[in-house]
C-alpha cells in the first residue's frame, strides 16, 4: 500500500483551514480504513508566509492528530513556490503526492478516481474541472481564452486543470531536476511525460475567506505562464518587425513616385502617424524582449525558490526519543 501525502499551500487561510482539516480528516480516515492508502499517509500544510493565524492553526492541527503535518516558508513566495516546497519536502516521506488548494474548491472525492488511475500504473493524474459554473463569469471566460492562447503558443497544457493533481514520487523527483526559478507548474508537469491520465470533477465555490488571486496577480501569473514556457512571442515580434519594415519600404517607394510626378508630398499626417506607429511597435518589442531578459537574469542567479523556516515532520522525526522506557534515571 502506498503512502499518500496531501500538499496544501495556505496563504492567510485562517478561516478556511479548520473546515478543510475536518473534511480532509474524514477523507483520510475513509481512504485508510478502506485500505486504499497506508496509515502513514498525511496532510502537509504549507504556510506561505501568512500574516494571520494560519501557522498557529497548522501547529495545533499537528498536535491534535498524527494525520497533520506542516512546513512554514520563511516568507510569502506565492502559490507555485509554496506548492513546490511542499512537494519537495513530502517526496522524502511519500510514495504519492496529491496537491490541492486550501479552499476545498476542488472536490476531494476525486482522489478516489486519482487512486484508481494510480492503480492502473499512472505516474501523474490531472484533476480536470468538468464545469466551472461556480466560478465567476469573468474568471471562466478569461481562463478559457488563456488556455486557448497557451495552446496556440505551443505550450502543452491540460485544459481546465489547475494544480489539483496526483504525482508519484518518481514524477516529483523528475520535477526536482527542473531547476528553473520561473515556475509555472501546470505547464512544467506535462513536460515530464510518464503515463498520465485525467479525472474530472465539479468545481465548487470557495467556502470561506477570499480569493488570494486578485486580477493583478492573475495577470502576472498569465504572463509568467507564457514567457516561462514559450518563445513564440519573440518570434512573433520578429515577424511583426519584418512586416512593418516591408510596409515602410512600400510607402517610401509610393511617396518617391508621387514626388517624381511632381505632386506635393503628402505631409504632416502620414509622418506623424508612422512615427507613432513605429515608436509604439518598438516599445512593445523591447517590452517583450525585456520580459525574457528579466527571466534570464533571474535564472542565472540560481536563487532558491523557497526557504523553509519550520518543518514539523522533520522536527518530529529528529526529536530525541523521550519515551518513558524502563525508568532509566533522568539524564
Ligand atoms: N496561495 C498561496 N500563496 C499565495 C496565494 C495563494 O499559497 O501567495 C494559496 C491559497 O491559500 C490557496 C491556493 O493558493 O490554497 C489558491 O488560491 P485561491 O483559492 O485564493 O485562488 P483561486 O482559487 O481564487 O484562483
Ligand atoms: Mg480557490
Image (tube, rainbow, N blue to C red):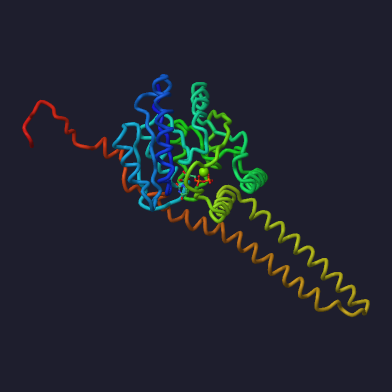
- Residue drawn at x 69%, y 69% is 279
Quarter-wise, where is residue 251 in the image? bottom right
Return the x and y of residue 286 as percentages of the image width and height. Answer: 62, 64
Horizontal side, residue 145 vs residue 219: left or right: right
- Residue drawn at x 50%, y 41% is 207
Horizontal side, residue 214 vs residue 67: left or right: right
- Residue drawn at x 61%, y 51% is 231
Q: Quadrant of the N terminus?
A: top left
Quarter-wise, where is residue 237 in the image? bottom right
Q: Is residue 298 above or below residue 39?
A: below
Return the x and y of residue 310 as percentages of the image width and height. Answer: 31, 45
Numbered label tally: 0
Q: Nearer the viewer, residue 256 or 281?
A: 281
Q: Is residue 33 above or below residue 100?
A: above
Q: Nearer the viewer, residue 96 or 260?
A: 96
Q: Is residue 28 above or below residue 35?
A: below
Residue ranking furthest to the right: 261
Return the x and y of residue 152 as percentages of the image width and height. Answer: 67, 45
- Residue drawn at x 45%, y 30% is 168
Residue ranking furthest to the left: 329
Q: Nearer the viewer, residue 59 or 186?
A: 59
Amino acid at each position: 500500500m502506498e503512502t499518500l501525502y496531501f500538499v496544501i499551500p495556505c496563504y492567510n487561510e485562517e478561516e478556511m483551514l479548520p473546515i478543510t482539516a475536518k473534511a480532509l480528516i474524514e477523507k483520510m480516515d475513509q481512504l485508510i480504513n478502506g485500505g486504499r492508502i497506508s496509515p502513514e499517509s498525511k496532510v502537509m500544510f504549507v504556510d506561505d508566509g501568512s500574516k494571520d493565524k494560519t501557522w498557529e492553526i497548522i501547529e495545533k492541527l499537528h498536535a491534535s492528530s498524527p494525520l497533520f503535518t506542516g512546513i512554514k516558508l520563511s516568507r510569502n513566495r506565492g502559490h507555485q513556490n509554496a506548492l513546490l516546497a511542499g512537494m519537495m519536502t513530502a517526496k522524502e516521506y511519500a510514495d504519492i503526492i496529491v496537491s490541492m488548494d486550501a479552499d476545498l474548491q476542488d472536490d476531494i472525492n476525486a482522489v478516489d478516481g486519482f487512486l484508481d488511475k494510480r492503480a492502473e500504473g499512472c505516474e501523474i493524474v490531472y484533476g480536470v474541472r468538468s464545469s466551472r459554473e461556480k466560478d465567476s463569469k469573468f474568471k471562466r471566460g478569461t481562463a478559457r481564452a488563456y488556455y486557448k492562447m497557451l495552446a496556440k503558443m505551443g505550450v502543452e497544457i491540460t485544459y481546465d486543470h489547475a494544480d489539483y493533481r496526483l504525482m508519484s514520487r518518481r514524477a516529483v523527483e523528475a520535477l526536482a531536476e527542473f531547476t528553473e526559478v520561473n515556475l509555472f507548474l501546470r505547464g512544467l508537469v506535462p513536460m515530464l511525460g510518464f503515463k498520465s491520465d485525467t479525472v474530472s470533477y465539479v468545481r465548487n465555490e470557495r467556502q470561506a475567506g477570499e480569493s488570494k488571486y486578485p486580477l493583478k496577480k492573475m495577470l502576472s501569473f498569465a504572463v509568467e505562464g507564457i514567457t516561462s514556457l514559450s518563445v513564440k512571442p519573440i518570434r512573433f515580434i520578429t515577424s511583426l518587425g519584418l512586416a512593418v519594415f516591408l510596409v515602410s519600404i512600400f510607402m517610401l517607394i509610393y511617396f518617391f513616385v508621387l514626388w517624381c510626378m511632381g505632386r506635393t508630398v503628402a505631409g504632416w499626417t502620414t509622418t506623424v502617424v508612422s512615427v507613432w506607429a513605429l515608436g509604439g511597435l518598438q516599445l512593445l518589442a523591447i517590452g517583450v524582449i525585456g520580459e525574457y531578459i528579466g527571466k534570464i537574469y533571474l535564472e542565472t542567479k540560481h536563487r532558491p525558490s523557497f526557504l523553509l523556516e519550520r518543518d514539523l515532520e522533520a522536527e518530529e522525526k529528529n526529536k530525541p526519543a523521550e519515551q518513558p522506557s524502563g525508568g532509566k534515571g533522568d539524564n
